Amino acid sequence: MKIKTAEFIKGITGTNEILEDGKKQVAFVGRSNVGKSSLINSLVGVKDLARSSSTPGRTQEINFFLINNRTYFVDLPGYGFAKTSKRKREKIRKMIIWYLTYSGVKPHRVILIIDARVGIKEFDIEMLSLLQEENIKTIVVANKMDKVKKSVEHKIIEKIKDQLSDNAKFLPYSAKTFLNKDRLIEFIFSNF
């Protein structure tokens, strides 16, 4: 499937009618500063659709982007950024868990994004466990592969795979070079 149109619709912090309009939702989740906005922009081919910031932890809402007038890409706030207050981190964590478990929406897919250079952290393992418990089809995407030296690329990929359970889907990715863009789009839109 080709992505032909993409537009920002709204940001929410709780219950909203957009959750009940019947369109399938694909959620993007990950720690702050893993390149969620850049990844979304690379998929849709619009440079500034999802706004990225040099300040991690800037997104504090659940942002909805309408793709091809039929599917929402849902950009969840980044979790685990140490320089925000404990209260704010907890609020964001609760918002993410609410969306994934209690909002009444079951996302069609979840893209769990990690920074390839950093690997999987405790928060990511917890998020993956939650997604598996909720039986949501998920793929772990190691973004920023363009910043990994070729000499250690294989080693990094194997280390990440070792940290994942055998049934977890995994894909190296680069929002900058579009590495594996077609494969990720195929995963997102399969069985629509």
Image (cartoon, grey):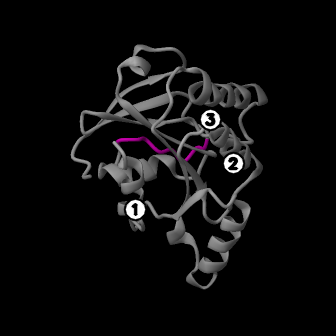
- Say if residue 77 shows up in the picture: yes
Q: Nearer the viewer, residue 56 or 108?
A: 108
Q: Mark 3 = which residue? A: 134
Q: Mark 2: give few (<14), some (14-19) or many (20+) Cα within 10 Å.
A: many
First along the sequence among labels 1 and 2? 2
The answer to which quarter of the image holds residue 59 is: top right
**How far, Cα to Cα, is label 1 from label 2?**
22 Å
The kind of residue on which mark 2 rests is Asp
Q: From this view, report whether residue 76 is shown above or below residue 146.
A: above
> Considering only order in the chain, which callout, 3 or 2, is on the residue closer to the N terminus?
2
The residue lying at 52 percent from left, 27 percent from top is 61
Q: Is residue 1 left or right of residue 72?
A: left
Residue 28 drawn at (x, y percent): 50, 42
What residue is disc 1 on? 183
Is 134 or 151 nearer to us in this picture? 134
Which residue is painted at 42% across and 57% down in the image? 184
Q: Nearer the viewer, mark 1 or mark 2?
A: 1
At x 69% / y 59%, what residue is drawn?
164
**Residue 172 image point, x, y percent:** 52, 66
- The residue type indicated by label 3 comes to Glu
The mark closer to the camera, 1 or 3, is: 3
Q: Which residues are magenta?
A: 49-56
Instruction: Determine whether the residue tagged by mark 2 lies in a helix, strand or loop.
Output: helix
Q: Secondary structure at mark 1?
A: helix
Q: Amino acid at mark 1?
A: Arg
Q: Secondary structure at mark 3?
A: loop
Report the side of 42 relative to 103 (left or right): left
Residue under circle 2? 124
The circle drawn on residue 118 is none
Q: Which corner quadrant of the image does residue 84 belong to? A: top right
Name the residue at the bottom extreme: 151
**Which residue sits at x=34%, y=28%?**
23
